[in-house]
Image (tube, coloured by chain):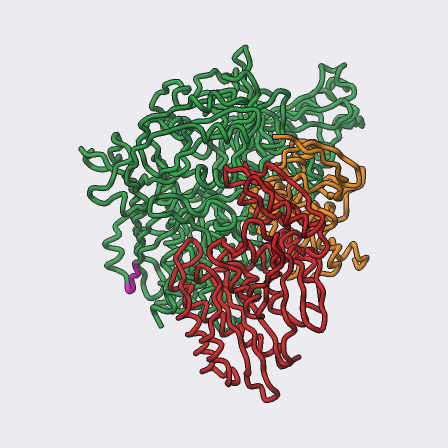
Chain colours: A orange, B green, C red
């Protein structure tokens, strides 16, 4: 099968790659671009571990084809921190112990960032429903939601 | 031991040292590693639940461009019919090999038959489609009752039930019978004013870790091998793989990646030996990553069970007898945790008369793997439900009933030892005194309480504390970190060394870089590996004192260690750790401490949970609206991660109680092998989980630690089940309490 | 396996042409949240035509005559439209229920409709609103009702060379509002076990003068249930009328038992949903 040449902007950096039409954006990120921060939990859009943004929209990268990234802006977990500075969300996840095994964490960090961009002052219920597509099996979500609410407050400057 | 002691570092909520890699995505999990020349392995799995393999033709697959090698049971050397220690128990080596690759017979939908290594996963999948296998399909048995029925298809011709008075002459699907007893239950029931007996059913469930099994194996020309994999115990992977492939342990290096959840399910091997076989045959490193449906079809799960419980009590609440008969599904090969179910079911109660029988039954489902307190959730679900029903019948508060009969120091357990000091009473009181318990319920709401017991284990751990010339140190340990344990190791080293935690970096070494450590499971890591950290630190302090003594020309007994400083009690000299380490080359070489132990004295952890639900009686939908989990941690090294265990266990139990179950077709094919239809709890399904840490120190650990990883999954099944019973006024006897089941209960009893 | 060829269409005409000239099985790729899963599961090669660069497919316009919806507009954008939500709150609710936030970032009403799952959330809501499908092919344009568009499990009425180019819903009469409810065992993510879309028109006295009731996930396709609507018309949606509507819906359903629900459960619950959706629709109609 002939490979397609794709040019995309990932975390603000122009990247080019070759991929087969059947490869998903998740496959491309992990296998072609060596960006393994985005995880595969299910491959069918049911767990959110592969969450990224495409042109600002929060999506499951396992449900986007690599070829669809042509000309698009992709945001992954690798782009959330700024050089050696953690994002507030990442810092709060650590402070609240909102991760145990950590496999769902990259997806949750990306999703939380997307949540707080669309809704800077979510209620607990709004946060839970927005993040319903991010499965966690370790924490029971309690500390995750606390980290999200604290991040929201801090980012708003209400702390 | 440490009750009155003030701690400086443990008990604080430090930032876990491995956290930065995890929140940035840098941490390497099982599927995140690659090697030059790497190819991919994929598995051909049985489309039938029960069948004989008549013929296999791989010729078309072998001819496909891009295919490097094919492996099957024929590539496994013949092994002895022995048990090997691995994970949270032992495995039969022959069974393990037949689970890795089916031999002659497939025993469950998804059972691995062959594996193909190819340039890409897509080519490997194509090759698998080209392989022709002829089956003679057999009738599957999918349920305990069917498996034990007269004339049932037999899975293993050589299975003769063990544990019976007389060895049977015909093969059956019942592998083993267990029995435990104390006193005389008949006399106990005769003395009772009220007796309740019930039959219960719990379904097949999966541990549900988000990370699929993944490994990368390489076998080189020298017979040396390496496996990089996600596992709870890389030494167990080494032991199992070396035993299956008849290798010396020194030939196989296993590197534990970060692990994306295990809960007991990643304590055995599936793909790891296969990746080595394929690597040997192809001359390339071979990576194997399970798809999500493979994880459900061919790993885990937790046993389905049929449980009968009978409890007798006096009107004043004294329990006079408890009896149980438990049947657990082992899956395709023997070895369900029914024995542990027998041992834990009634242990929260101080009893004179108790009798339990347990049966290990094979069915055409995947071989079960350990699932968090294996065996206990099912049996204790049944016991706690009946205890609650007794409470209701005699008009007694369910917490008061439990307090009246609570297991405590000196209680004779059914499985042998007497309990040492334990914290069940304190947990019951914490829940009784909580705001939650005092709050009022509204219409259509119900409340349930339940207790849980798990032994916890100790076991072997090895730690090196290697000091650097600048006075910092590396804690080299061998316990894969599934929930934040590195933070606790760092805190314990800091506490013992009396130096800030940032001085010590914990790492998890591979099987060649640290001495033997048993797997992360059994709630052992903070307890046993922690103990080894403490011993290693004590070893370092001893050496620090000796070096200081040498410098000052005094004896080591004259040197004190305080706040990271050696002090000459016979004079005014002081030397900091940094100074001693900097000068270590002149006093005998760099300082390294070790702790190689087989930790004894693991203290059990009791848990008590409280759950409020609301039921929509028109649809059967159950919502958990409030939840409190209290558990005895002995001493919480890192309170946030202890709370995390309580909360995580509670939510797995809630899922088990509400919506999780394997759904099979009539032909024994798994119909819900994905997260869409295997329904684990979502963030939007739950309220906050109030975690109450109770601390009744374990005298056998320097800081009083009790493991907490497992007990938390036990009480939710009955806490939720009883809450639903309470809300609808009808006893719940089957899990999960899914809407169709709850609605049927409501409608049948309207 | 499956996707072997990927093309981007710049216009409706180009998309139709690509479909008409296809040498292998070709599907339209919008959000892809169903399609990509389906292609992963099959061995046969598939070609896809990406329509996300066609403006009219990705946008929605509201006018005095009603809504013209680009079928591939992502749900996250569609559900943010306050004007559409004001006129068709039930349809927007239904669209919002599809999948997770991540799925919402890609999925579309048109995709949900064309995929024609028996349990699709938007279809009962579309039917309740009397929505119509504008189909383009080599021979031109045709319009069919949503009920006629969906023909079976995963089947729609389009030929291989046809494309759904717009979904049109006429502006409802004054005093009309819709609602959609579904039943799932968790709070999100699940495929509907039963679904109900209801539209009611109330006069000044609160009497129902018109209604449409559609049920989903309880037959091979979503069903328009005139008997349920008739039970509401002429009433003030009192308990007796609601019960009659619920019973009519239950009687019209032809559910199966599967890993998501039993026959008895679905039959009962769809009635409950019709009742509850009718009440919500009526409350909204009064507020308008």
Outermost residue, front side:
C139
Q: Is C109 on the left-hand or right-hand side of B99?
A: right
Identify the residue at horizontal 73%, vertical 39% (top origin). A78
Quarter occupied by residue B635: top right
Q: Is residue A106 above or below residue B594?
A: below
Q: Is B67 on the left-hand or right-hand side of B579?
A: left
Q: Position of residue B623 (x, y in %)?
A: 51, 63
Res. C178 in view: yes
User: Which secondary structure is most common in the magenta stretch?
Assistant: strand
Query: Magenta span has A89?
Result: no
Quarter occupied by residue B171: top left
Identify the residue at horizontal 46%, vertical 16% (top origin). B247
Q: Which residues are magenta?
A: B193-197
Front residue of this view, candidates B575 and B317: B317
Q: Position of residue B67 (x, y in %)?
A: 52, 22
Outermost residue, bottom side:
C205
Q: Is residue B304 above or below residue C240?
A: above
Query: Magenta span has B196?
Result: yes
Q: Position of residue B578 (x, y in %)?
A: 78, 26
Outermost residue, top side:
B222
Front residue of this view, candidates B152 and B656: B152
Q: Position of residue C220 (x, y in %)?
A: 44, 59
Q: Is B493 on the left-hand or right-hand side of B102?
A: right
Q: Is residue C254 above or below residue A50?
A: below
């Amino acid at each position: 099968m002939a490979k397609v040449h794709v040019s995309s902007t990932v975390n603000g950096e122009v990247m080019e790659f070759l991929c087969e039409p059947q490869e998903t954006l998740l496959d491309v990120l992990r296998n072609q671009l060596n960006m393994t921060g985005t995880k595969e939990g299910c491959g069918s859009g049911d767990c959110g571990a592969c969450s990224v943004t495409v042109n600002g929209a929060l999506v499951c990268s396992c449900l986007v084809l690599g070829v669809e990234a042509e000309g698009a802006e992709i945001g992954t977990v690798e782009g959330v921190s700024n050089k050696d500075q953690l994002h507030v969300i990442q810092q709060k996840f650590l402070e609240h112990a909102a991760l145990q095994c950590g496999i769902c964490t990259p997806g949750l960090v990306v999703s939380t960032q997307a949540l707080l961009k669309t809704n800077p002052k979510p209620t607990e219920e709004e946060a839970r429903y927005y993040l319903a597509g991010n499965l966690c099996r370790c924490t029971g979500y309690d500390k995750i939601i606390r980290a999200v609410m604290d991040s929201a407050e801090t980012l708003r400057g209400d702390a | 031991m440490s009750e009155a002691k003030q701690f400086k570092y443990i008990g604080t909520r430090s930032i876990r040292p491995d956290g930065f890699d995890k929140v940035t995505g840098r941490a390497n999990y099982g599927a995140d590693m690659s090697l030059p020349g790497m190819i991919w392995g994929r598995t051909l799995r049985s489309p039938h639940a029960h069948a004989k393999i008549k013929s296999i033709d791989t010729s078309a697959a072998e001819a496909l461009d891009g295919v490097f090698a094919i492996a099957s049971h024929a590539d496994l050397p013949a092994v002895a019919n022995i048990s090997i220690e691995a994970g949270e128990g032992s495995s039969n080596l022959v069974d393990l090999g037949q689970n890795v690759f089916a031999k002659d017979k497939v025993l469950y939908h998804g059972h691995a038959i062959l594996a193909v290594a190819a340039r890409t996963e897509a080519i490997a999948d194509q090759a698998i489609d080209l392989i022709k296998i002829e089956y003679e399909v057999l009738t599957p048995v999918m349920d305990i009752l069917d498996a034990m029925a007269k004339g049932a298809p037999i899975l293993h011709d050589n299975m003769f039930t063990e544990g019976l008075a007389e060895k049977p002459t015909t093969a059956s699907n019942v592998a083993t019978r267990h029995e435990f007893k104390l006193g005389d239950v008949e006399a106990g029931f005769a003395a009772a004013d009220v007796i309740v007996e019930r039959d219960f059913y719990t379904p097949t469930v999966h541990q549900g870790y988000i990370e699929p099994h993944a490994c990368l194996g390489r076998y080189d020309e020298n017979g040396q091998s390496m496996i990089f994999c996600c596992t709870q115990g890389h030494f167990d992977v080494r032991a199992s793989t070396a035993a299956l492939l008849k290798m010396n342990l020194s030939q196989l290096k296993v590197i534990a990646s970060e692990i994306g959840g295990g809960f007991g399910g990643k304590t055995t091997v599936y793909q790891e030996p296969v990746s080595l076989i394929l690597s040997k045959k192809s001359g390339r490193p071979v990576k194997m990553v399970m798809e999500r449906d493979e994880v459900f079809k061919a790993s885990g799960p937790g046993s389905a069970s049929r449980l009968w419980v009978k409890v007798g009590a006096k009107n004043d609440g004294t329990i006079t007898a408890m009896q149980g008969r438990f049947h657990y599904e082992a899956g395709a090969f023997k070895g369900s945790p029914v024995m542990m179910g027998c041992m834990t079911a009634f242990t929260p109660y101080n009893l004179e008369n108790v009798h339990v029988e347990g049966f290990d039954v094979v069915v055409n489902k995947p071989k079960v793997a350990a699932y968090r307190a294996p065996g206990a959730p099912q049996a204790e679900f049944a016991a706690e439900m009946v205890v609650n029903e007794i409470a209701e019948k005699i008009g007694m508060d369910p917490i008061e009933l439990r307090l009246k009969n609570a297991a405590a120091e000196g209680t004779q357990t059914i499985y042998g030892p007497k309990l040492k000091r334990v914290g069940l009473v304190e947990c019951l009181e914490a829940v009784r005194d909580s705001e939650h318990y005092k709050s009022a319920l509204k219409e259509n709401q119900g409340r349930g309480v339940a207790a849980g017991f798990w032994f916890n284990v100790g076991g072997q751990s090895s730690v090196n504390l290697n000091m650097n010339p600048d006075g910092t140190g590396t804690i080299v340990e061998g316990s894969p970190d599934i929930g934040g344990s590195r933070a606790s190791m760092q805190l314990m080293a800091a506490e013992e060394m009396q130096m800030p935690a940032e001085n010590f970096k914990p790492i998890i070494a591979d099987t060649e870089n640290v001495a033997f450590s048993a797997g992360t499971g059994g709630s052992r890591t903070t307890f046993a590996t922690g103990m080894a950290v403490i011993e290693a630190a004590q070893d370092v302090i001893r050496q620090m004192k000796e070096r200081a003594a040498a410098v000052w020309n005094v004896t080591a007994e004259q040197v004190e260690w305080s706040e990271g400083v050696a002090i000459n009690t016979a004079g005014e000299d002081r030397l900091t750790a940094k100074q001693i380490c900097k000068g270590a080359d002149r006093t005998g070489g760099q300082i390294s401490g070790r702790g190689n132990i087989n930790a004894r004295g693991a203290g059990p952890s009791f848990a008590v949970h409280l759950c409020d639900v609301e039921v929509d009686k028109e649809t059967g939908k159950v919502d958990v609206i409030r939840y409190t989990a209290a558990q005895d941690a002995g001493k919480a090294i890192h309170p946030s991660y202890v709370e995390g265990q309580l909360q995580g266990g509670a939510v797995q139990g809630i899922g088990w109680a509400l919506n999780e179950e394997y759904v099979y077709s009539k032909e024994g094919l798994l119909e819900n092998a994905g997260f869409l239809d295997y329904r684990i709890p979502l963030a939007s399904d739950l309220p906050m989980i109030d975690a109450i840490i109770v601390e009744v120190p374990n005298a056998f650990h320097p800081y009083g630690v009790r493991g907490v990883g497992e007990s938390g999954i036990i009480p939710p099944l009955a806490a939720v089940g009883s809450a639903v019973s309470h809300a609808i006024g009808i006893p719940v006897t089957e899990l999960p309490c899914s809407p169709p089941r709850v609605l049927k209960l409501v409608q049948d009893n309207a | 396996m499956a996707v072997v060829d990927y093309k981007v269409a710049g216009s409706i005409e180009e998309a139709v042409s690509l479909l008409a000239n296809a040498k292998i099985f070709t599907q339209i790729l919008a959000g892809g949240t169903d399609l990509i899963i389906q292609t992963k599961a099959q061995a046969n090669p598939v070609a896809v035509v990406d329509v996300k660069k066609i403006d009219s497919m990705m946008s929605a316009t509201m006018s005095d005559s009603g809504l013209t919806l680009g079928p591939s507009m992502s749900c996250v954008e569609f559900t943010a439209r306050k004007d559409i939500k004001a006129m068709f709150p039930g349809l927007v609710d239904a669209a919002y229920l599809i999948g997770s936030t991540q799925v919402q970032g890609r999925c579309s009403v048109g995709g949900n409709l064309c995929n024609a799952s028996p349990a699709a959330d938007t279809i009962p809501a579309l039917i309740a609103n009397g929505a119509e499908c504008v189909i383009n092919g080599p021979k031109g344009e045709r319009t069919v009702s949503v009920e006629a568009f969906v023909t079976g499990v995963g089947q729609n009425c389009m030929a291989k060379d046809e494309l759904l180019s717009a979904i049109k819903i006429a502006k409802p009469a004054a005093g009309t509002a819709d609602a959609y409810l579904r039943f799932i065992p968790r709070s999100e993510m699940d495929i509907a076990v039963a679904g109900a879309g209801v539209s009611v028109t109330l006069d000044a006295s609160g009497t129902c003068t018109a209604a449409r009731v559609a049920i989903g996930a309880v037959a091979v396709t979503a069903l328009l249930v005139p008997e349920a609507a008739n039970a509401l018309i002429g009433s003030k949606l009192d308990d007796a009328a609601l019960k009659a509507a619920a019973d009519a819906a239950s009687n019209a359903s032809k559910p199966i038992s599967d890993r998501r629900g039993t026959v008895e459960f679905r039959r009962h619950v769809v009635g409950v949903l019709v009742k509850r959706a009718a009440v919500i629709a009526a409350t909204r109609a009064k507020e308008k």
